Amino acid sequence: MSGELAEGVNSLEKIILREPRGSSAEVYLYGGHVTSWKNEHGEELLFVSSKSFFKPPKPIRGGIPLCFPQFSNLGPLDSHGFARNKFWSIDIDPPALPTTSSSKAYVDLILKPSEEDMKIWPHSYEFRLRVALGPGGDLMLTSRIRNTNCDGKSFTFTFAYHTYFSVSVISEVRVEGLETLDYLDNLQKRERFTEQGDAITFEGPVDKIYLSTPTKIAILDHEKKRTFVVRKDGLPDAVVWNPWDKKAKAMADFGDDEYKYMLCVEAAAIEKPITLKPAANSIPRESSRVVEDPLLWLLYVQVSWIFGWINEIRRAEDIVEQC
Ligand code: TA6
């Protein structure tokens, strides 16, 4: 780890990552939750509500909540699962990470279930999260979820990086890359529709799960002449959410007009839940870059699954040892 441990809101511990050219990021051990990502000019790129509680067991409102092992209310657990309201630890000896990044500014966190947790979700797992800042200031999140069940049982989960991007004003924003795709509308009992052919703009509440999206999605903020480009493969779905005014007023940890300054675009695996056999390992990765000049933008979210017999055989040996 190359970050600096610091005291955050309500004395919750956080790690501050700094990249030599000036970009920075902050991650709370509570929830393994990224709450800040700044470019080399020190400008904040993620939205965190001024009303967020920062008080366990409430999740932090904003930044990048991790939705695991359940997205939204798609299951018996609390909304978006429990990973976002657990205390993670710093992973002092993480296994080597297959990565293409030459990042030096990173931290490894780990979450494992307690006996109590196993009563809620009866599975043994290791959830490792690496948060890294790349040389160009891009933010990379690499999760490694491993099934460490000793009883031979597989487990199934849905997953999302519930990223809250900070925008100038929502009416100035458009999303490209989701045109003509099918989506499940959470505002209409998850009925399935097909998106129109133009870039998506925002004139009201939106809560859509886009299915099997392309690997690249762009969020263009014309006012700030800033573009976030999300590229992903492997985490097939993407959620787009803005609560707008009514829902904003109904949320105690969200300011009444804060909906104007945020947009959630979430790399996710929802339609086809992921099943991990014992010893299997999945590695959903996310990497983001902000480009002030739309022409240069290359921001990519790498999500790759490494399901490999080699991994399984190697992992199987590990597990036998552990069980
Ligand atoms: O990702 C969109 C969504 O599932 C919305 O339906 C909305 O509920 C949002 O997440 C926030 O959920 P939360 O549990 O954090 O209040």
Image: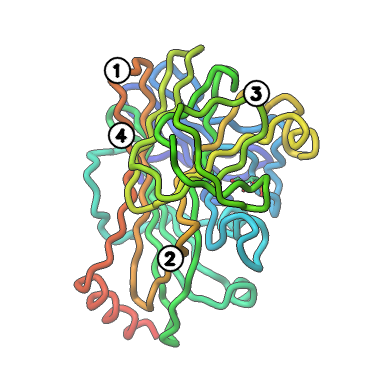
Work out whether mark 2 precedes mark 3 in sequence or the reverse, and give the earlier one. Answer: 3
Closer-to-camera residue (288/230): 230
Query: Badge 2 is on which residue?
Result: 274
Expressed as whole percent of the image width and height from the top left, the position of residue 262 reads 59, 28
Which quadrant of the view contains residue 201?
Answer: top right
Circles 1 and 2: CB distance less than 8 Å?
A: no
Circle 2 packing at 10 Å, graded few (<14), some (14-19), many (20+), is some
* Rendered view: 271 above or below 188: below
Work out whether mark 3 precedes mark 1 in sequence or the reverse, and give the earlier one. Answer: 3
Work out whether mark 4 precedes mark 2 in sequence or the reverse, and give the earlier one. Answer: 4
Work out whether mark 1 precedes mark 4 in sequence or the reverse, and give the earlier one. Answer: 4
Query: Badge 1 is on which residue?
Result: 295
Q: Residue at x 70, y 50 (%)?
A: 58
Q: Residue at x 41, y 58 (%)?
A: 128
Q: Secondary structure at mark 4?
A: loop
Circles 2 and 3: CB distance less than 8 Å?
A: no
Which quadrant of the view contains residue 312?
Answer: bottom left
Q: CA distance from mark 2 to mark 3?
A: 34 Å
Circle 1 packing at 10 Å, graded few (<14), some (14-19), many (20+), is few
Q: Secondary structure at mark 3?
A: helix
User: Which residue occupies the extreme left position in the image?
Assistant: 310
Q: Residue at x 67, y 53 (%)?
A: 189
Circles 3 and 1: CB distance less than 8 Å?
A: no
Left or right of residue 160, residue 87 in this image:
right
Query: Badge 3 is on which residue?
Result: 260
Q: CA distance from mark 1 to mark 2?
A: 35 Å
Q: Secondary structure at mark 1?
A: helix
Circle 4 packing at 10 Å, graded few (<14), some (14-19), many (20+), is many
How is the structure coloured here?
Answer: rainbow
